[in-house]
């Protein structure tokens, strides 16, 4: 007679840092009405235990119920060097055939979730990975964990019988949750659009996310249709706002309540953080009772930006000359180098995906500066 | 020394009566030693690794048998084994990788007792697959002159490409051959079509926009009158990891900026003859977006039904032709455009790319515009 553990199909769990292997509960492989992910990521945590994941190829946002885990979350001294090589190895591909699309930390468990693509091309397999405090990497069944999907309204109503499938596609560049709404930033591979979409959660059927055009009225009188690169939800003056960072690098404040479908919203530019720069990721946190933003950039390092009483800042309405900065001051955090992605871990720590001096990609906990 | 006997000795030294009994039973039952084997499908692709006669054992299945990728580049990290499912088939332990074995990879199966089996994902000579065949087929805009505020470039490939690596292999050089830095907007996931064969590159709107800070310091990536080269590096891997068949260079001369919306009324229509399948020819007087021209411009009959037919682009996207499947009827028709249709500088029928917020209000997107015509 086989002992019970012999009958267990054992685990998509493997040890990455010499941590003790443990059998994880096997997820059901299928679930009625659970669509398959065509692509996965970016990610954002919403209400307790719900993980939102963009599926750009399907033009949908999925809500997933993350499975319970007995594993410990990431601690303040967590470091997993070569996280991309470890994930690639676990998924059986060379490092160059693995793309990490996004990182999200579950605020309830401090477990790290990575959206990755296994493969090089458009047919790469989307995989949701979970990493625990011991560095063990677990491959989750994202399809089976899906509890709802919402379509992004992008299909033009004017193509009643267009032949074949459209080759237009939007890549979702960032995802957030605020004030009961999933907020989605994207960029099209054809027509130029720089709109945000909002989708109320729980998802209602037949209520696709509607586009909102955002203007940030800086740069003389000209509206800028530069795309939102990254954003976060942040409370300003008791109201939910999003703080959106654009390429080259204005920081714009937009009240969430104005993000109604079809609205044209003019955001307030509260900072110009310098040119030749691409904002990569952003979090907000509180230190010594004061709010701050921490923003990772392509060429200007990690910026710590005081976010105290933002409602009192005047919007920047004039052209900022000389390639300089204006508005909110910021401080460059010199010790944080090569940071590509950021998320909050707890009240005093964050987690970064950062390229180390030796070229290795590390998943590390940091003390919030 | 074989592993079962080694285990027996170890147990005796431990002087544990229970362990001794258990191990003796285990050894007694094991008439033949374990054996590591591979299961392949009919095409020769590895499907599962089997540890024959794996039971009984006190170890968990995940410890009894692990399968690792043999990476082409060695790593100094202790890399984890493949994720997958361990299951028992009688006394045999079977490991099936969650994501399958890849044809062109090699793997190493290792048992707890030290047995090892190295195998390729597919049992055949794969070297011939590494011959590059993927080619860059077209670039849009296809003209040799681009306005200095051109917004978008499409690269069309003959086969699916790797994603996320364009910034390593696409370069924009000025007349002196110097690299123009940050010319294209860097987007981690890039803007591919669903097939992975067409990449959209955006000249960074932050540079193209008048009034934005970097424009003042960096200027546009193109300046009227100057010559540039779009360089595609042959080392760019396609989706199967093979490089391109060849690299390519495309010389472009920049012309004056185009800040105006295309005007549908200004287009020239060369009307077809009723009763024939002659193409309708629409000349825009400027180049429009090659992708949008195939999706957001079409023909309807007087009652609003879409006419079926074939679209072709001529004269470097300055001319759109439509050849109907059935002969034209001598009746009113309409050329219909989604007003999101753009020229190559991002100026749409609805609004120029650069909008003065204080003077203009743009209507919502997706409004259809019509221009009536009747075949001769």
Image (cartoon, grey):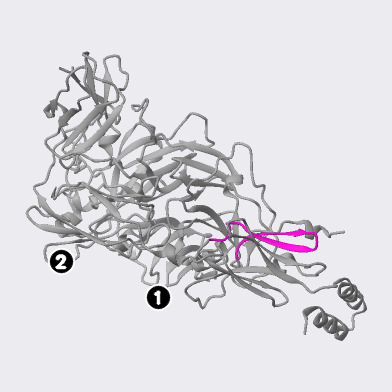
Say left or right for A89 vs B361: right
Q: Is residue B208 visible?
A: yes
Is residue B330 shown above or below B220?
A: above
- Quick one: label 1, few (<14), some, or many (20+) residues within 10 Å? few
| x 30%, y 14%: residue | B303
Q: Chain of mark 2?
A: B
Q: Is residue B94 shown in magenta?
A: yes
Residue B143 % position (x, y): 15, 47
Q: Nearer the viewer, residue A291 or A164?
A: A164
Say whether residue A138 is left or right of residue B177: right
Is disc 2 placed on a helix, strand or loop? loop
Residue A217 x, y percent position in the rendering: 24, 43
Q: Nearer the viewer, residue B367 or B79?
A: B79
Q: Is residue B197 above or below residue A202?
A: below
Q: Indicate the secondary structure of the residue bearing disc 1.
A: loop
Task: Verify whether residue A360 appears in magenta.
Answer: no
Expressed as whole percent of the image width and height from the top left, the position of residue B238 reads: 38, 58
Residue A357 - label: 1
| Residue hosting label 2 | B177
Residue at 40%, 69% in the rendered image: A336
Query: In which quadrant will I find the N terminus of chain A?
Result: bottom right
Q: Quadrant of the C terminus of chain A?
A: bottom left
Discs 2 and 1 share one subunit: no
Question: In this picture, which residue range is highlighted in magenta?
Answer: B82-102
């Amino acid at each position: 007679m086989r002992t019970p553990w012999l009958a267990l199909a054992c685990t998509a769990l493997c040890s990455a840092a010499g941590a003790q292997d443990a059998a994880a509960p096997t997820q059901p492989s299928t679930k009625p009405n659970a669509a398959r992910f065509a692509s996965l990521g970016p990610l954002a945590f919403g209400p307790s235990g719900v993980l939102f994941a963009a599926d750009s190829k399907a033009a949908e946002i999925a809500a997933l119920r993350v499975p319970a885990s007995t594993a410990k979350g990431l601690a303040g001294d967590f470091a997993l060097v070569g996280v991309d090589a470890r994930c690639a190895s676990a998924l059986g591909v060379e490092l160059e055939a693995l793309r990490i699309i996004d990182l999200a930390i579950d605020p309830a468990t401090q477990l790290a979730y990575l959206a990755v693509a296994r493969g090089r091309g458009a047919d790469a397999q989307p995989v949701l990975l979970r990493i625990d405090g011991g560095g063990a990497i677990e491959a989750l069944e994202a399809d089976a964990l899906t509890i709802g999907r919402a379509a992004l309204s992008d299909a033009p109503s004017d193509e009643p019988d267009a032949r074949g499938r459209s080759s237009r596609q939007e890549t979702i560049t960032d995802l957030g949750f605020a004030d009961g709404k999933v907020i989605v930033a994207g960029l099209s591979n054809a027509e130029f659009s720089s709109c945000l979409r909002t989708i109320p959660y729980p998802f209602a059927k037949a209520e696709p996310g509607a586009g909102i055009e955002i203007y940030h009225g800086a740069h003389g009188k000209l509206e800028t249709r530069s795309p939102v690169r990254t954003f976060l939800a942040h409370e300003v003056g008791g109201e939910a706002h999003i703080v959106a960072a654009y390429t080259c690098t204005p920081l714009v404040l937009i009240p969430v309540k104005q993000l109604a479908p079809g609205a044209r919203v003019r955001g307030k530019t509260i900072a110009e953080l310098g040119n030749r720069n691409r904002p990569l990721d952003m979090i907000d946190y509180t230190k010594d009772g004061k709010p701050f933003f921490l923003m990772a950039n392509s060429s200007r390092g990690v910026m710590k930006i005081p976010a105290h009483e933002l409602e009192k800042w005047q919007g920047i309405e004039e052209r900022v000359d000389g390639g300089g900065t204006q508005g909110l001051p910021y401080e460059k955090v010199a010790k944080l180098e090569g940071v590509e992605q950021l998320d909050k871990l707890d009240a005093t720590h964050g987690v970064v995906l950062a390229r180390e001096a030796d070229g290795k990609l590390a998943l590390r906990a940091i003390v919030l500066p | 020394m074989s592993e079962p006997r080694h285990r027996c000795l170890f147990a005796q030294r431990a002087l544990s009566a229970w362990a001794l009994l258990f191990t003796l039973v285990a050894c007694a039952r094991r008439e033949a030693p374990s054996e590591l084997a591979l299961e392949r499908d009919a095409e020769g692709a590895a499907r599962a690794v089997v540890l024959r006669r794996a039971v009984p054992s006190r170890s968990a299945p995940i410890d009894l048998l692990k399968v690792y990728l043999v990476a082409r580049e060695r790593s100094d990290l202790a890399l984890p084994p493949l994720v997958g499912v361990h299951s028992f088939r009688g006394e045999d332990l079977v490991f099936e990788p969650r994501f399958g074995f890849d044809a062109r990879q090699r793997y190493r199966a290792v048992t707890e007792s030290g047995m090892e089996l190295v195998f390729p994902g597919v049992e055949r000579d794969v070297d011939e697959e590494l011959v590059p065949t993927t080619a860059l087929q077209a670039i849009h805009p296809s003209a040799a002159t681009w306005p200095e505020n051109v917004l978008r470039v499409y690269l069309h490939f003959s086969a699916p490409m790797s994603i996320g690596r364009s910034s390593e292999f696409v370069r924009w050089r000025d007349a002196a051959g110097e690299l123009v830095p940050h010319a294209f907007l860097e987007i981690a996931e890039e803007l591919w079509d669903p097939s992975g064969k067409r990449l959209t590159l955006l000249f960074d709107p932050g540079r193209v926009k008048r009034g934005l800070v970097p424009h003042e310091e960096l200027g546009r990536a193109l300046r009227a009158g100057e010559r540039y080269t779009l360089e595609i590096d042959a080392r760019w891997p396609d989706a199967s990891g093979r490089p391109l068949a060849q690299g390519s260079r495309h010389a472009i001369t920049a012309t004056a900026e185009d800040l105006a919306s295309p005007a549908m009324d200004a287009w020239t229509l060369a009307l077809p003859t009723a009763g024939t399948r002659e193409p309708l020819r629409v000349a825009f007087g400027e180049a429009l977006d090659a992708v949008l021209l195939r999706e957001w411009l079409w023909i309807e009959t007087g009652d609003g039904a879409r006419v079926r037919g074939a679209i072709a682009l001529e004269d470097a996207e300055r001319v759109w032709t439509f050849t109907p499947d059935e002969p034209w009827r001598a009746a009113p028709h309409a050329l219909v455009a989604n007003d999101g249709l753009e020229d190559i500088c991002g100026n749409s029928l609805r609004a120029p790319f650069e909008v003065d917020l204080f003077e203009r209000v743009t209507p919502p997107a997706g409004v259809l515009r019509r221009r009536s015509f009747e075949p001769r």
